[in-house]
Image (spheres, helix red, strand yellow):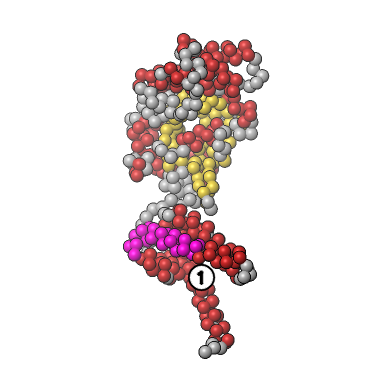
Amino acid sequence: MNVPVSTFDTALTLILIFLFFAEITWIVGIWGIFRKFGVKGWWALIPGGRKYWLGRCAGDINSGRVLCIIDFLLLFCHSYLLFGDENSTPYQGVEILTMLLAIGYFIYSWRLYSRLCVAFGKRRWQVVLWICFPSIMALIWGWSDKYQPVQKVNIYSNSDPVLSVQTKKALAESVEDQKTGLVVRLKYRAVRDFLTRRYLLRDIYLSIDPGRMVLLLGGSGAGKTTLVNAIIGYEKANAKILLNDKDVYSDYELMKYDIGFVPQLDLIRGNDTVMQTLIDAALLRLPTTVPTKKIDESVKETLEKFGLYSLRYNLVEKLSGGQRKRLSIAMEYISDPFLFVLDEPDSGLDGVVSRDLFKRLRAIADSGKIVLVISHTPDRAIDLFDDVIVLAKDSRRTGRLAYYGSVNDAREFFERPTMEQILQCVNQKDEGGEGRAEEFIAKYAERQVAK
């Protein structure tokens, strides 16, 4: 029995109308869900993008990314199947690819909706309703006040959860450029994360005078290494870094000789002697215009400064842990840098050896240079430090400046007697801390603005 053409056209029209309204309902519903999570609602209009951000809301970034890619691939496949030649070999291949993508879409949609149920505090079995009636579920969960997120997720956003625009502007203006020393005016350091920008650091404004030895303190992921890399020009940020009134970024080829950086792990060849290691470092670190006689003098002075002269003919592999660490520092110091940055120089050293090392760094600072140290055992030799920088993560896991000033003032500011207790104060609760980071970030900013 033949179906009248008019009846077929009517059925097709009704199906298209139903699909159109289902899509509109889905978009409106997802818009509402985004609104509840603080995501810009217009992302619901973007094919692929809406699934990615829904994954962020659900706390399942991987599923969101996969579904975003599948969305675009399916769009391409459907377009090809609609306008391509049905008898061609590529057409059949696209049909198979479409079926495989549809299977993947179902699997990852199940995972995403399951995590979304958890984010809303609902039982996971409701994922079945999401699979069968996605538009209706999105509309209900997006706009009904009975459905509210109960699971906090990390949504990257341009907005600042701690400081107002006026406070940020005043904070930036509170740090003046100076002819000598280090000036850091870091607006932000961010990286691209698929369709979003993720902030690693924000609003770091400070200046360090010559002759200061500064401790850089912060919990895991607070941005200590990121800040150091930005300061020394290794990873540029949206920032202006001045060293003795010269821009580190724009004049990097000239400034790199004024900056020394000692990483946590050394890359020293064990079968070289101490002297040969320093000579190689001098040839690498010093400009090619430096005469050989000057290099020899620099090597000798550096060996004596770090107590390595009597060991100059010893193989590196025969050195103790403390001696090897001193050699690592000497390799960077050979160029006589003005700014000396060290990442956990006391790592793996006992208390006596560690203190001896910090005394040598103190002597370097006393010679009119700036010494910036990252340490996970800050109270070992805190009396040798002048100042402390405290970085802390805000609610979006972005590194922020919670304090910069003298060691004694830090104790009063945080009302804690030790650096370890200060660190515990600003660490997140899921890291065993008190979770007061944003409180101190705002408190420090207000104090700086009021000066």
Where is 377 relative to 432, above or below?
Answer: above
The quadrant holding residue 321 is top left
Residue 103 seen = yes
Q: Residue at x 43, y 40 (%)?
A: 221
Percent from the top left, x then y, of residue 121? Answer: 34, 60
Q: Amino acid at mark 1?
A: Ile
Where is 271 relative to 42, above or below?
Answer: above
Residue furthest to the right in view is 289
Percent from the top left, x then y, of residue 293? Answer: 62, 11
Q: Is residue 329 magenta?
A: no
- What residue does disc 1 label? 24
**Mark 1 residue crowding within 10 angstroms, few (<14) / some (14–19) / many (20+):** some
Choose between 375 and 321: the one closer to the eye.
321
Choose between 79 and 33: the one closer to the eye.
79
Percent from the top left, x then y, of residue 148? Answer: 38, 61
Horizontally, residue 218 falls left or right of residue 255, namely left
Q: Residue at x 44, y 68 (%)?
A: 134
First to last magenta residue range: 100-125
Where is 177 relative to 289, above or below?
Answer: below
Local secondary structure at mark 1: helix
Q: Residue at x 33, y 41 (%)?
A: 432
Residue 139 seen = no
Q: Is residue 102 magenta?
A: yes
In this rendering, the count of numbered labels is: 1
- Look at the magenta stretch and give its main secondary structure: helix
Percent from the top left, x then y, of residue 314? Answer: 47, 13
